[in-house]
């Protein structure tokens, strides 16, 4: 299970370096949507790892890698005054994970994610 998780984490981290968008905020939110797809697809794997291992290292190492990969995107968006500076990336990832955990279909969760990501933008951007 760890190998399955590691491959997907590699893909999400790599996406942070190649994500496209018209602005720094667009690039960040596009990557956060990719992270959301990872969380919703791999949630059972992560829960299995937590249940069947004595340590949470695979999960927490993955989280650290995600933060390291996404931080340049957040920093660029905040420096461009497009994303509010009140939250750090850990908090934003927690928000995305919390939305991914909501019961219901992808169609049910998608507008919730859209509203949350729109709320990250600074007023007037």
Image (tube, rainbow, N blue to C red):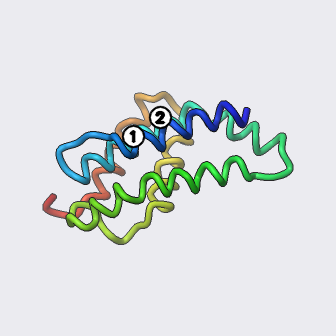
Give the farthest residue toward the left. 124
Q: Where residue 66 appears, x then y in whole percent?
A: 52, 51
Quadrant of the image for the N terminus? Answer: top right
Q: Where residue 62 appears, x then y in whole percent?
A: 61, 48
Quadrant of the image for the C terminus? Answer: bottom left
Give the farthest residue toward the bottom. 86
Q: Residue at point 28% right, 65% down? A: 78
Q: Where residue 35 appears, x then y in whole percent?
A: 46, 42
Q: Residue at point 29% right, 66% down? A: 84
Q: Nearer the viewer, residue 105 or 41?
A: 41
- Residue 31 quadrant: top left
Q: Residue at point 86% right, 50% down? A: 54
Q: Helix, strand or loop at disc 2? A: helix
- Marks 1 and 2 in Cβ contact (< 8 Å): yes
Q: Residue at point 54% right, 35% down? A: 40
Which residue corresponds to mark 2?
37
Q: Helix, strand or loop at disc 1? A: helix
The reply, left or right, for residue 96 in relation to residue 42 is: left
Q: Is residue 27 above or below residue 45?
A: below
Distance between mark 1 and mark 2 Cα atoms: 6 Å
The reply, left or right, for residue 78 in relation to residue 59 is: left
Which residue corresponds to mark 1?
33
């Amino acid at each position: 299970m760890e190998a399955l998780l590691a491959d997907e984490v590699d893909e999400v981290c790599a996406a942070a370096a190649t994500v496209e968008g018209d602005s720094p905020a667009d690039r960040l939110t596009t990557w956060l949507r990719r992270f959301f797809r990872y969380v919703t697809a791999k949630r059972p794997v992560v829960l299995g790892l937590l249940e069947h291992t004595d340590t949470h290292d695979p999960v927490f190492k993955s989280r650290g890698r995600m933060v390291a990969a996404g931080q340049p995107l957040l920093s660029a968006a905040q420096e461009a005054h497009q994303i509010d500076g009140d939250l750090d990336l850990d908090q934003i990832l927690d928000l995305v994970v919390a939305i991914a955990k909501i019961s219901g279909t992808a169609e049910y969760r998608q507008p919730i994610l859209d509203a949350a990501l729109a709320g990250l933008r600074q007023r007037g951007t």
